[in-house]
Amino acid sequence: MPLPAYAGSDHCVALLQGAQELFPALIAELDRARADVQFETYIFDAAGAGAEVVEALVRTARRGVRVHLVVDGVGTGRIAEPWASQLREAGVQVQVYSPLGPLGLLLPRRWRRMHRKLCVVDGEVLFCGGINVLDDFIDPNWGTLAAPRLDFAVRVQGTLVDFAETIMAQLWLRMMAVKDVQHRQLVKAWVDWRAARALRHSDGRRTEKRARGIRAALLLRDNVRFRTRIERSYRRAIAQAREEIIIANAYFVPGGKLRRALILAARRGVRVRLLLQGRYEYFMQYHAARPVYGALLAAGVEIHEYAPSFLHAKVAVIDAHGARPWATVGSSNLDPLSLLLAREANVMVRDADFARDLRARLELAITQGSGALDPETYANRPWHERVLDRVAYAAMRTALWVTGKKY
């Protein structure tokens, strides 16, 4: 599979599991920042361990580092006090992506959310994944969790960091253009960004390019330039699979093309395992997923439902022990919201050690934290569950029809 132009083979990529691994690595980079930090997240919650990230952003801004923070208008809305005041007083610049307004989600255009979880520090280090600024043991809707949420992120150095930084800066400037009516303010934001880039070049922070490293690419989904890149990457990798496919996905409602790709892979002898949400979290995501299980199970796809805590991962690994290992870690679910409406970001990696590391962690979650869904049990589930499944699936299809999307 050819890599996009903004990819390369000079990357250092580290896999991080949960906020318990991500937050210390992220905070260490924030405390070393010298020029600028760009941060995007869907949920920004300062409860528990999330407060440590907020405090690190405050420390960073107080040193004079330019800090831009983008949060989503649904996932976060307004940042709670006293954290909002602390961020503002420290000089952290905060923008809310697509605030809901008085009509909220009644307007279909408000369904397009900023679901990316990205952070670029000094143009040198990128963090990308599915992990929000949210304590692993705290759920905004369900309270304290008995076990940590299952999720992943990566820390990346190399060519793709420049691309990530530019894309994030473009989003910030577009939001500024909507928010600010005075042109000089937008120009100032652009000048400040260029100045920050120049500063980190001059202070010796930027390291030399690596001659060789891990092949990796940053894959985006938006509503303009990158509408289908993440889904096409999945389908291409699945079509090329020869031995094994493992996908862990929180909200799994794949479209027809993706379902057919998985079914064809299973029929040609590839072992296909799906690690999916086993606990009820949201009505739509939980019930709308189940009508698609039947055809997958009939084709020999194994479905394992994760039970110890909420599954929030959006990762996959293919042929980890084969000649062409492939893995992805990011924010994109395999459902209509992610693949048709939201801004998403995944890092794709072609490296045997990385793929095997991810596979080992998923294997552990499958064998010790999930139960296999029996096809007969699925077919004979209670009638009221089947009714709820069909209602949720029909509601999802109706919502897609309203947006004019095909899936």
Image: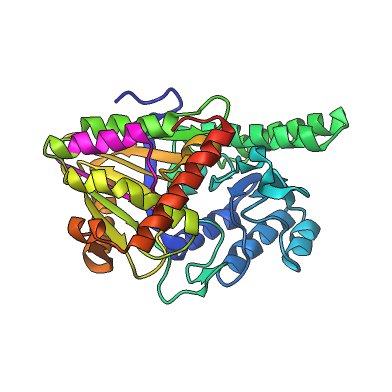
User: Viewed as shown, does residue 36 lie left or right of 393?
Assistant: right
Residue drawn where x is 40% and y is 43% of the image: 334
Q: Is residue 172 above or below residue 127?
A: above
Residue 91: image location, x then y, percent: 77, 53
Residue drawn where x is 42% and y is 77% of the image: 146
Residue 5: image location, x then y, percent: 43, 22
Residue nearer the viewer, 337 or 364: 337
User: Viewed as shown, does residue 50 lie left or right of 2?
Assistant: right
Magenta highlight on residue 63: no
Residue nearer the viewer, 342 or 118: 342
Which image quadrant: the C terminus?
A: top left
User: Viewed as shown, does residue 253 lie left or right of 227?
Assistant: left
Q: Is residue 65 visible?
A: no
The segment highlighted magenta reads 243-265
Residue 70: image location, x then y, percent: 66, 47
Residue nearer the viewer, 199 or 159: 159
Magenta highlight on residue 246: yes
Q: Is residue 284 above or below residue 208?
A: below
Q: Is residue 125 visible?
A: yes
Considering every residue shown, the one lying at the far left of the view is 269
How is colour applied across the structure in the image? rainbow
